[in-house]
Image (spheres, helix red, strand yellow):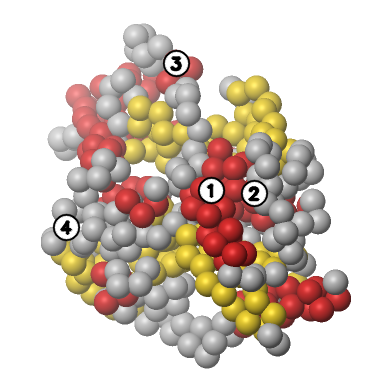
Amino acid sequence: MLGALAGIVVAVALLAFVGPLQDLLPDTGEQTRQQEAQEVIEDSYFRPTDSEELQNASINGMVEKISKANDDKFSHYFDPATYRRFQASSSGEFSGIGVTVTETKQGLRVAQVFDGAPAEKADIGPDDLIVGVDGKSLAGVSADAAATRIKGPPGTTVNLTVVDGRTGERRKVDVERANVKVPAVTGRIEEVDGQKIAYVALAGFTRGAHGELRSEIERLDGKGAEGLVFDLRGNGGGLVDEAVLVQSIFQEDGPVLTIEGRARDEQTFEVTGDPLDGIGPIAVLVDGNTASASEIVTAALKENGLATVIGTRTYGKGVFQEVIPLETGGALDLTVGEYLTADGTSILGKGVVPDEVVKDKDPRDGDDVLDAGLDQVAAELRGS
């Protein structure tokens, strides 16, 4: 469950599939032109060179070439040292600062900051940019690799360069890492003109999240909720099977998404199990940090006429990656396929457009998007 996760949560690289593609990698037994060129450089360049650095630069150049040609900002190369840190940081041995993030050219944009987390204590807030870690720039660094740099043993300190999302002011701040318990689901009852409406926020599509979500909706239904505001703002995605199971809470039958890739057969995922009865009208809250699996669910709810989508256009991820270890060290975090929404639409670069566009002008002065969602559900209840 998400409650057991520690530290920073990478928001845009989490649409996960099982089944490595390592067998598709080419045979490296024969010397290539690339290897020949490297040998010539090592033997003949007028100053000494580092063999490992040349190899990393060569592989990184290949990934950058195909990424640029296909407008793909999600594929990256992990050199052996980065990959080792990535594996360690994913093993539970490391902790972080308690935020979810999305990847930008400059670094990491903060999507959510969890209550009581080190980031909150350091006055890091949503829409702030983390552009440097321990004096090194994050420009062009993948979200996974950047998050790996931020993570570390609990109690240790990381120095972050942060650009304020409102003022653009740049500052450096020391943040002490800690084990951060992230709630998968939070919920409460809201009242609008005497009508009880359930408010439920889902932080990510991690293993078991659908069960927590279903239980929370049932709990609030037992308290008299007549409708639902489902908050997916700042939700960067997660596991594809969890997205299907979450959608199955609301949808009786039919497709949720289709995936396809050059090395994968086309596969359509349909809802499974029994949906909840009597939820009432639903409003889904989204923003530019709603990505990947959360976009799949948002689109499925909208396209099946099950909810009104409120907020701003979602991230527009539309593709999924797989981390493929290389036998010689390091790994490729490679885009291996594209996914289509319930009605066969690609959201790559486009996102899901809300039915009602609402932007929270000043988060310090109430929550305009939440208010719009509550008003929408209340209006539908009055009209029913």
The answer to the question of whether label 1 and label 2 lie on touching residues, with beta carbons closer than 8 A, is yes
- In front: mark 2 or mark 3? 2
Q: Position of residue 189 (x, y in %)?
A: 57, 75
Quarter of the image where one finds residue 274: top right
- Dot 3: element: helix
Amino acid type at mark 1:
His
Q: Is mark 4 on a helix, strand or loop?
A: loop
Vertical side of 93 occupied by 79: above or below = above
Whole-percent x, y for residue 128 in the image = 41, 73
- The numbered mark, 2 or 3, whose residue comes first in the sequence reads 3
As measured in the structure, the alpha-carbon distance from the residue carrying label 1 to the one carrying label 3 is 33 Å
Along the horizontal axis of the image, is 151 left or right of 315? left
Real-space Cα distance between discs 2 and 4?
37 Å
Count of numbered tags: 4
The residue lying furthest to the bottom in this view is 365
The residue identified by callout 4 is 154
Q: In this view, does 104 lie to the left or right of 328?
A: right
- Mark 2 — residue? 249
Residue topped by disc 1? 210
Q: Which of these two is toward me, 268 or 313?
A: 268
Q: Earlier in the sequence, mark 1 or mark 4?
A: 4
Q: Name the residue under label 3.
A: 23
Can residue 341 be seen in the rendering of this structure?
no
Disc 2 packing (10 Å; few <14; some 14–19; many ≥20): many
Q: Disc 3 and disc 4: Cα gap in Å?
A: 37 Å
Q: Residue at x 40, y 60 (%)?
A: 183
Amino acid found under the numbered disc labelled 2: Ile
